[in-house]
Image: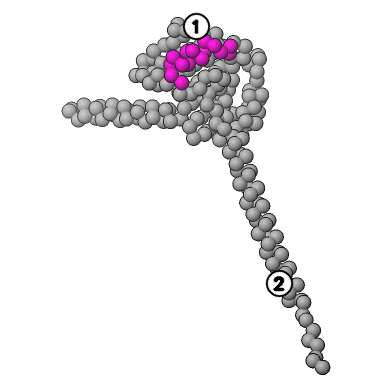
Amino acid sequence: AAESVPVDYTADTADTADTADTADTADTADTADTADTADTADTALAVRPPTGFGRIELGFGLDETKEALSGDPNFLFRGDPDVTMLREPNETLIEAEGATFIDRAYFQFHDRRLYTIILDLDPARIDHYTLYTTFVGRYGEPTFLDPQQAVWRFESVRLSLERPLRVKYLDAAVFDAIVAEQKRGESLTRLSRDRFLDQF
């Protein structure tokens, strides 16, 4: 009679276990990657940079801002008497009295586009800590922090909470362009002075 040959199932079992472990590891890695991607997406969705205060957004035109202020209960806007042409070229300022939580507000324009919003708040009605925790809850931890101010920097906007109690929104691109223009002007002034001094 033919001799019976025993079958070794150990190797197959080991191979099956290795395959299962590899699959489990791959699944775990895929799950982790998916979780990381989801967390990143959630963070991106959660932290949206501010575009302005209430109905008033950075980038608004002068007339658009005046119209928004007229219908905003946070401000006691009087119209044109609150609008000032500044000495700097292409600069306009709206200074309006605030209502309730806001003492005074300033809206600065460059080339008739709003690029700065400054709100001086009433410390008798709202406190620094409440604002700070609200901003942290909405925008995360500040990019910069010292005893005088907390700053949240985004690609297009800079938001700051300053002591004693001031909130400032700044259009980063416009501000950087203004600073660069001022530096060019200073360089030309120095050059003209040096040329003048060379004549002695």
Q: Secondary structure at mark 1?
A: loop
- Count of picture labels: 2
The quarter of the image holding the N terminus is bottom right
The crowd level at tag 1 (other Cα within 10 Å; few <14, some 14-19, many 20+) is some
Alpha carbon of mark 2 to alpha carbon of mark 1: how far?
82 Å
Are the residues flagged by discs 2 and 1 in contact, CB closer than 8 Å?
no
Residue ID at (60%, 32%): 139
Mark sitting on residue 78: 1
Residue 126 falls inside the magenta stretch: no
- Residue 101 visible? The answer is yes
In the rendered image, the vertical position of residue 144 relative to residue 93, given as above or below? below
Q: Position of residue 133 (x, y in %)?
A: 65, 28
Hey, which quadrant is residue 192 in on the image?
Answer: top left
The crowd level at tag 2 (other Cα within 10 Å; few <14, some 14-19, many 20+) is few
Q: Position of residue 108 (x, y in %)?
A: 45, 18
Hey, which quadrant is residue 147 in on the image?
Answer: top right
Residue 73 falls inside the magenta stretch: yes
Q: Secondary structure at mark 2?
A: helix
Q: Nearer the viewer, residue 100 or 189?
A: 100
Hey, which quadrant is residue 180 in on the image?
Answer: top left
Q: Nearer the viewer, residue 5 or 159?
A: 5
The quarter of the image holding the C terminus is top left
Q: Residue furthest front?
A: 1
Q: Residue furthest bottom?
A: 1
Q: Position of residue 11 (x, y in %)?
A: 73, 76
Residue ID at (55%, 8%): 76
Disc 2 marks which residue? 15
Disc nearest the viewer among 2 and 1? 2
| Residue range corresponding to the magenta coloring | 60-74
- Residue 93 visible? The answer is no
Q: Main secondary structure of the magenta part?
A: helix
In the rendered image, the vertical position of residue 133 relative to residue 101, given as above or below? below
